[in-house]
Amino acid sequence: MGCMLILGATSDIARAVARRFAGEGWRLILAARSTASLLRLSTDIQVRTGREVVSVSFDVLDINSHKDFWGNLPECPDAVFCAVGYLGDQKLAESDFSEVQRIVLINYLGILSILNLAAMAFEKNRKGLIIGVSSVAGERGRQSNYFYGSAKAGFTAYLSGLRNRLSPASVQVLTVQPGFVMTAMTQNMKLPPLLTAQPDEVAEDILRATQKGKDVIYTKWFWRYIICLVRLIPEKLFKRLKL
Amino acid sequence: MQLSNWGQYPKVNTTLHHIRTDEHACHLLSLNASLIARGLGRCYGDSALNDQAVLSSIYCDHLIDFNPATGVLVCEAGISLAMLLRIFVPRGWFLPVTPGTKLVTVGGAVASDVHGKNHHVAGTFCRHVLWLELLSSEENILRCSTTENPDLFQSTCGGQGLTGIILRVAFRLVPISTVYIRQETIKTRNLEEIMDCFEHSANWHYSVAWIDCLQTGTGLGRSIMIRGEHANIEDIDTIKACVPLIAPEKFSLAVPINLPRFTLNIWSAKAFNAIYYGHHAEGTTNQIVDLDSFFYPLDAIQEWNRIYGKRGFLQYQCVIPRAAAQEGLTHILNRIARSGMGSFLAVLKLFGLQEENGGILSFPMEGYTLALDFPVTPQAFSLLNELDAMVLDYGGRLYLAKDARMSCATFERGYATAIDRFRKIKTTCDPNHRFISLQSKRLGIGG
């Protein structure tokens, strides 16, 4: 197994993915802003696997630092998993543009900046794996979260284009479209239990998808069909729904 | 949200918060005047319920340190025993004590001071705990052990979360050389035989019996004794010996919905018991089984609590001192058989001596423990009240982790020697009674 860089490593999905992939024998480089939580997670995985885990500080907002960040990694990773995400405050964003900037910077621009560096390296090596966690919120804009949703829509399109570009270089690009997941991000929402995945389930789905060489996965799987139905609602009707 | 524990009774409307970090736990503590910590909610009754705030530890599931030279593991309280087994069994380590389900957290195992099939040799879970860290009502993190804050340690072990929030635990794992158990089952015809069998099983590491609680007369207490030892490499066949620490994959089933109440009745229970008893060969049978089949047969059926329907069930676990056990169990089993409410799964086990300086409210005492399930019905409540009186008359008591209904008087008589000391410590460490459960209110354990 190779080496995987995990961006946004302290998110719940990333934590589950880190543990799952470490269990499969991957070497990990954990990257996130909060060093205290990083240390807690890297210690956890070291004790779990008995292997060393590297952790590095990474700030997605500090775009100018990304080149150095990538250049200073202890080794060139074979895979990048990006779980960076920020739901933001929709209401605030409607009146305060700085919140919009923050949402777009974290969920879109910042991620593109670092993934571009990975893409270049992987294209040159003619191998690699890029996994991006997008969101079903990006599949159709809704009044409750369209700033976040539109940034994720952009990210989904980016991953699709990247996949198209890197396919000849045999680099796998996997788009992960989670529906509801029980995480810190959603802890104040009332989620329907049957539609909601645990981070561990998402991690398991991602592991399987990488093994099978998939391009896009929905997790839980039935979200593919839910989204299909949501897309089918005519705009005339959709615009009147309270979603 | 509506919350209940494994027995699905009682249900309570409350707010569930997930603790993320120590600071977050302090923050949640400062926001709520009355609360209780909770792990995976596998206690059966109302010990992990509070109608104002419940603080879940399941995201505090990080490992902190493991020393392969000593087997000492330091971990956060929210990690499940299942996860620990997944990590450590392949490396040749097992839990020092395990309850009949692995779907409990380490914090829960400490708070209930759980016991297992090896109680007669290994005692309860907390005997293997070196220290723990507790978030107290004053928002301090206190390290507790037999030497540091010993009163708090003894009241936290088995204290049902009433002393604070357990954040971290250090305890000792035990080495194993295979993932298999050398199991021996013995079919016994009545209570006398099974008790005799227990008395002669003292040198087996694990022992437990399934008991048919619907039999009367000469068959009263007929049982299947199941005892085991960790298998060595020489005990298992050559195919298994190639990967001695990895068990073959198994199917797991799930009960998808709460079953309608009529599924469970005296006839289906009788049929189940007859088939279970009948399918075991006469005399003694030897087998090699894996850890999961030996320790956690019910975990193979996810959400098995749903077979009792949405009204839920009551689990009843009592212990009767050794000297009074023969008479007491005869009396109790007769009463249960007569009620026609015998449960599918009844379990009998002989506890060993409980150590002096163990958990103050820990359940075990030297004697026989009997565990049964009853669907929630008015008749079940009155039957259990009758059983309470019998248990107390024989000097026994009930397990707090399984209880949802005993009276304050029953509790006080059963835990007579311990309760004053516990209340005193609780008043000192939690003067404003912030750590409260529905159970602690019902039983008047501080607050």
Image (spheres, coloured by chain):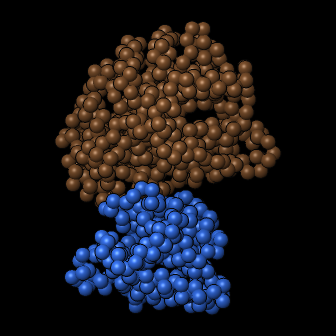
Residue at 48% across / 39% down in the picture?
A: B259
Give the residue furthest to the left: B432
Q: Is residue B317 above or below residue B337?
A: below
Residue B4, quarter of picture: top left
Relative to residue A146, is residue B66 depicted above or below?
above
Residue A18 pos. (x, y %): 52, 67
Identify the residue at image location x=30%, y=34%: B439
Q: Is residue A165 above or below residue A56?
A: below
B130 vs B29, left or right, is: right
| Badge count | 0
Which of the 4 image quarters holds residue B110? top left
User: Whole-percent x and y of residue B70?
Assistant: 56, 47
**Is residue A39 something one can see in this rendering?**
no
Q: Quadrant of the C terminus of chain B?
A: top left
Rendered shade, chain B: brown
**Residue A22: x %, y % from top left:** 57, 65
- Front residue of this view, candidates B359 and B50: B50
Q: Which residue is drawn at the image coordinates 56% and 65% (left, top)?
A: A205
B157, A137: nearer the viewer:
A137
From the viewer's perspective, is B286 left or right of B2? Answer: right
| Quarter of the rendering containing residue A151 | bottom left
- For chain A, the rendered hue is blue
Q: Is residue A90 left or right of residue B107?
A: left
Q: Residue furthest right?
A: B238
Residue B65 point in image, percent of width and height: 49, 55
